[in-house]
Amino acid sequence: MTLRPGNGPVRAGWLSLTLAAVSLAGGCKDAPTSAQTAAAAPVAADTPALADVPEGRPRLGLMTSLPIYWPLGAGVAEIASGTAEAPWQRVLLESSYVLQPLDSLASIPGLSPQDPETDPLAGLDRIAIIQPRGLSPADNVALDDWVRGGGRLLLALDPMLTGEYDLALGDPRRPVDAAQIPPVVARWGMMVRYDDAQPGDVQVRTLGDAMLPTELAGEIVVTDAKAAQCTLLADGAAARCRVGKGSVTLIADAAVFEHEAFSQGEPRALTRVIKAALP
């Protein structure tokens, strides 16, 4: 099955996850936007405290439909008051990066004709786009320009999420079950296809020096070798491309960003994958 821009297949049921598979190999009601300020949130006991993070962390732009930055099911009041528990993904990411949540990639017009536009990508040299809700035509253009100008991008597009989310289909808080492939992927000479007959067990692949656990992953195919300098990685579940002055790491799976079991103990898979994708 080839995934093209637009809606994909409906997510399959829950498939069992095992922490052993990795170790053997080595939201909200009125969801807040990035314009709303998030207060510090409590941290799980087995994850690094935000107060202990190193100084001089690089900034990382983050766009996602997954509950990575905002807690799933928490309201704006809980987030603003600091009583909402920070998602485990956010805690791990903020141990290495200063996160900047993104709602848009394209420039935002000023409130009046006299006001200047706001460029949400200004000052960012790393961006992670993980299972986004969909990119507008202007977002595609802005992202392509940003990468070609020297930006480093991690783009995770999962054709079949395996996480469980207790939210009805159509609920705006629910993550995108099947990735919508933005046209810019084709512009970079790639496509994502999905084999719905593949086994449903966890596959542990490698991305650079990082272990990349996947489940029901897509397959990346290079369709135009002249569009970018792309190398397939992780047995075809990932690709790294040189695009202009920048780079793109495309991963056709999001399991490592969904399942905490993969990042318990050391090495933490999510942190290693992010650093391998955005050196």
Image (tube, grey):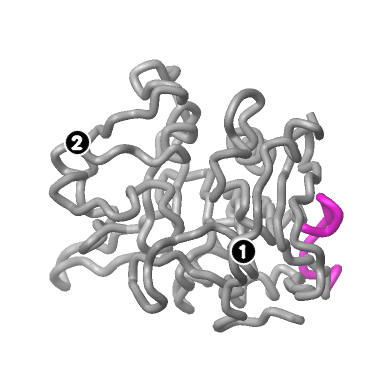
Vertical side of 206 occupied by 12: above or below:
below
**In the rendered image, which quarter is residue 24 located in?**
top right
The answer to whether residue 31 is left or right of residue 265 is left
Q: Residue at x 52, y 44 (%)?
A: 125
- Secondary structure beneath label 1: loop
The amino acid beneath tag 1 is Leu
Q: Position of residue 3 (x, y in %)?
A: 68, 79
**Which one is in front, 41 or 116?**
41
Residue 98 in the magenta stretch? The answer is no
Q: Position of residue 86 (x, y in %)?
A: 34, 38
The answer to whether residue 4 is left or right of residue 203 is left
Q: Quadrant of the N terminus?
A: bottom right
Residue 82: give its label: 2
Q: Position of residue 209 (x, y in %)?
A: 78, 33
Task: Please indicate, yes or no, whether residue 70 appears anywhere in the rendered image.
Answer: yes
Task: Please indicate, yes or no, whether residue 150 appears anywhere in the rendered image.
Answer: no
Q: Residue at x 77, y 69 (%)?
A: 227
The span shown in magenta is 224-237
**Which one is in front, 201 or 257?**
201
**In the rendered image, which quarter is residue 144 located in?**
bottom right
Q: Residue at x 60, y 48 (%)?
A: 152
Task: Write down the residue under mark 1.
Answer: 157
